[in-house]
Amino acid sequence: MNTNRNTWPWNLLTIAILFTLCAGLWAATKKIDYTWRWNRVPQYFIYHDETLIPAPFDGQVATISKLGDKTQIKVLGDNGEEETFEVDSNGIEVFEGETLFEGDYLGATFEWRAGPLLVGLWTTLWLSAAASIIGMVIGLITGLCRVSNNPTLRSLSVFYIELIRGTPLLVQLFIFYFFLGTVLDISRIMAGISALAIFAGAYVAEIIRAGIQSIPKGQMEAARSLGMNVPQAMIHIILPQAFKRTLPPLAGQFISLIKDSSLVSVIAITDLTKSGREVITSTFATFEIWFVVAFLYLLLTSVLSQVAAWVERRLAVSD
Amino acid sequence: MIKTVDLKKTFVGRDQTVHAVDGISAHIKPSEVVVIIGPSGSGKSTYLRCLNGLETLTSGQIIIDGVDLSAKKTDLNLVRREVGMVFQQFNLFPHKSVLQNIVLAQQVVRKRKSSEALEKARMLLQKVGIAEKENEYPIRLSGGQQQRVAIARALAMDPKIMLFDEPTSALDPEMVGEVLEVMKQLAREGMTMVVVTHEMGFAREVADRVLFMDQGKLVEEGTPEHFFTAPQEERTKTFLRQVL
Ligand SMILES: Nc1ncnc2c1ncn2[C@@H]1O[C@H](COP(=O)(O)OP(=O)(O)OP(=O)(O)O)[C@@H](O)[C@H]1O
Ligand SMILES: [Mg+2]
């Protein structure tokens, strides 16, 4: 390893190169006369939403009682009805005794709401998480079948793995959505998650198989010689060791899954990518939004790789 | 205790067939210590591995404590609990601490309570002389210490028979003694043991009977005195000349 003393000029050089690249990009966009509108971006993450509350009938305002941020407005109807509404104190639009007609606004409540980008980010997050968990289970089972002694299980798992790895995910998504979605009557979200999970499962299976086969034969023999049966030996001895070895490739697979999940936008699931496209149609801030979308994916993937690195360090106690 | 009748194990490879064990009949009595010697590739390990069902027999019969291993309905897992095995390469579980290595099978296989398994594990670690290492991981132990943990791990299952496959062959010379010492103590306590080893000193001192194998066959058997003073067969003499 280099010491800090020797690396700082190189770090400086790295920063200089990155800076030059950014400056170049900036100069290039100057030439095409693009107006950057970064200020339009934040409202698509989160915005202050105003909900106006209309009077339900003709009548008048009976009382207005203020309780801190909230205010209660009691309305008396011409036909003797009575109803109380709560609005934000700074959103009151009426005064006590005012005559009201049905549909007049009494006041407003204000709320912070997640914008389309945040909603899309959330969709991508839980979609990928669900697909990862299911994909892990499928991959684990398939990986075990792949190394089992039963020829049928082995052939079936090879068939599945080859089928999935030999066709594009985009095509699989279409098949899941248009064919299976129609035949089995599953929703588009279910179709998307299943396609991603089954896609990831094939790769996870190969990783698990390699992991299991990398464990020395003596481990299984030692476990069996103590009287454990094969499932017990797998659960307590082989899989924990295999899991430790396969953690880096598994993490890589799930990072890929997050990125691949952007393809579900083609079957009209409003994930981060599709939200980005929708925001662009209303803002025309094409460059900004795509950069932001890319950054958000990067955020998700780097959090995942940090978590994986942390787990890896935790498991390293026994080496 | 152990009876093998015309035991055969044949490995069929792509371009050759190996008769690793080629018709061995032997009878090992309770509390007997039997040492198996023989040149490399003579089938000693294979024979031993047949005895606890790690290899399936090609033909013949093994009867351990009245149970016929070759019978279809025999649950080998039940047999293996009663037959401990110690390997040349130790085969400790690297992801488990020393204590967990010994506790695990007791809980999983024997369904012992955690406290009972722990107590047993600590007692055995004391016995093999490494009580202070109970929380270490195997990788941080010396070879001799690892092999002693492996012995303790096998003993924790309360086996009726212990099989040793060259337990000291992977050890640095200065650690051979500490492992042999544990084995000698076991022998004194009356454990039935089958030991494959190149340690002729151990054979001479501890064995009740020595079996000499060559090319899958039992060439000669007898007491250590017989072997080391008056071997009969030519192949035995040649082998002993080389190792002594
Ligand atoms: N799984 C296997 N597949 C094919 N051949 C095998 C297998 N295991 C052992 N053999 C062969 O069987 C023969 C006996 O092997 P074995 O390991 O029992 O000998 P050994 O007496 O233990 O030798 P060593 O002293 O070197 O350990 C050898 O020729 C070996 O190549
Ligand atoms: Mg051997």
Image (cartoon, coloured by chain):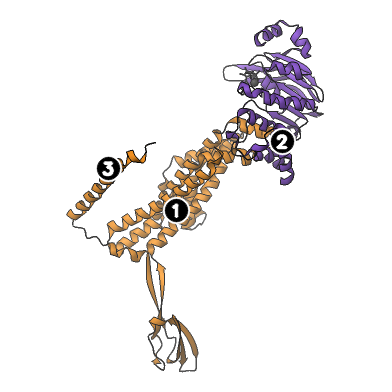
Which numbered disc flags the more N-terminal residue, 1 or 3? 3
| Chain A on-screen colour | orange
Residue A222, picture quadrant = top right
Q: Quadrant of the N terminus of chain B?
A: top right
State how far apart marks 2 and 1 are (Cα).
67 Å
- The chain assigned the colour purple in the figure is B
Say which amino acid is labelled 3.
Leu
Closest to the camera, between mark 2 and mark 1, is 2
SS for dot 3: helix
* Position in image of residue B28 (x %, y %): 79, 22
Say which amino acid is labelled 1.
Phe
- Which residue: 73% across, 19% down? B35
Q: Quadrant of the C terminus of chain B?
A: top right
What chain does badge 2 belong to? B
Say which amino acid is labelled 2.
Gln
Q: Residues within 10 Å of mark 3 (few under 14, many from 20)?
A: few
Residue indicated by mark 3: A13
Residue indicated by mark 1: A178
Q: Splitting the image into four quadrants, where does ligand 2 fall?
A: top right
SS for dot 2: helix
Q: Could you say which is closer to the camera, residue B8 or residue A265? A: B8
Is A1 situated above or below A67?
Answer: above
- Which residue: 65% across, 14% down? B39
